[in-house]
Amino acid sequence: MKNYLGFLSMLLLLVSCKTQNLFIESKEELQDSKLEIDSTFFHNPDYEYTIRKYDKVNISVWGQDELSVGSVYGIYNSNEVYGKWLMVDARGCIEVPKIGTTRVEGKTVVELKDTLRGVFQRWIKTPIVDVKILNKEITVLGEVKNPGVIKVDTDRNTLLDMIAQTGGFDFYANLECVKILRQEGPDVRVVNIDLTEAGIFLQKNIQLHPGDIVIVPSKSYKEFDKRVSIIIPLTSTVSASAIVLGLL
């Protein structure tokens, strides 16, 4: 009889427990749930990476090795170990073979390809041009299996994609306050993501940009949000991440 009553009590306890899928929202949640985050971090399906100072750029022209730097078409490989890239200098320019100084800062890869194609048409009837940025990276620090710098080839990367690249969250990860740091001009913007709370999936699975830093704190986190602002002025994402880790 005692065993029966114990089993019944356990069954009632299990029935009373409510489970929740964090990534499936009800109609009410989809209508009412709005994360109060900086618009900088809103999902942008049209986002394209723009070339920055000190980027490493590969240029490939099909069948034209003398115009290529780190060609992906011929016998050359886009391997930065051998220095087969052009560094964007402090003026935002690179030195392109046969063209000379070319301003590239602020251009997307597509825009630079179109620019080079237009110039190369002076000597080549139908130039096939490819451009690659070698140093597009996202950094993940803190309580993940393998924290570090992750090279990305595409502009379409998300928070959970990058966490998966590190092997997933560690046991002591605090999923209530995952931080993302993003450089915007002279400022670094910070957003807090709570992955334990139901909400709109696209707003939680933030679209990351090359250069972003993700910090996953440990469960010892307490009053962090009271000691860090939404914007850390006049600093870099690397310096800001050091500040954030120090506050943790």
Image (cartoon, helix red, strand yellow):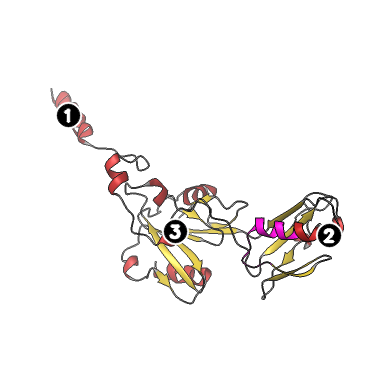
**Residue that label 2 marks:** 122
Residue 198: percent from left, percent from top: 32, 46
Q: Nearer the viewer, residue 89 or 63?
A: 63
Residue type for callout 3: Phe
| SS majority, magenta | helix
Q: Earlier in the sequence, mark 2 or mark 1?
A: 1
**Residue that label 1 marks:** 6
**Residue under the image location 81 percent in, 67 percent down:** 99
Residue type for callout 2: Arg
Residue 68 visible in the shown view: no
* Mark 3 or 2, closer to the camera: 2
Against 182, is 144 above or below?
above
Against 203, is 232 above or below?
below
Residue 2: percent from left, percent from top: 14, 26
**Residue under the image location 37 percent in, 58 percent down:** 177
Query: Is residue 54 rendered to the left or right of residue 126?
Result: left
**Residue that label 3 marks:** 41
What element does badge 1 sit on?
A: helix
Q: Is residue 109 magenta?
A: yes
Q: Nearer the viewer, residue 116 or 163?
A: 116
Q: Earlier in the sequence, mark 3 or mark 1?
A: 1
User: In the picture, which quadrant includes the C terminus?
Assistant: bottom left
How far apart are the alpha carbons under marks 3 and 1? 51 Å
User: What range of the chain is rendered magenta?
Assistant: 104-116
Residue 237: percent from left, percent from top: 51, 68
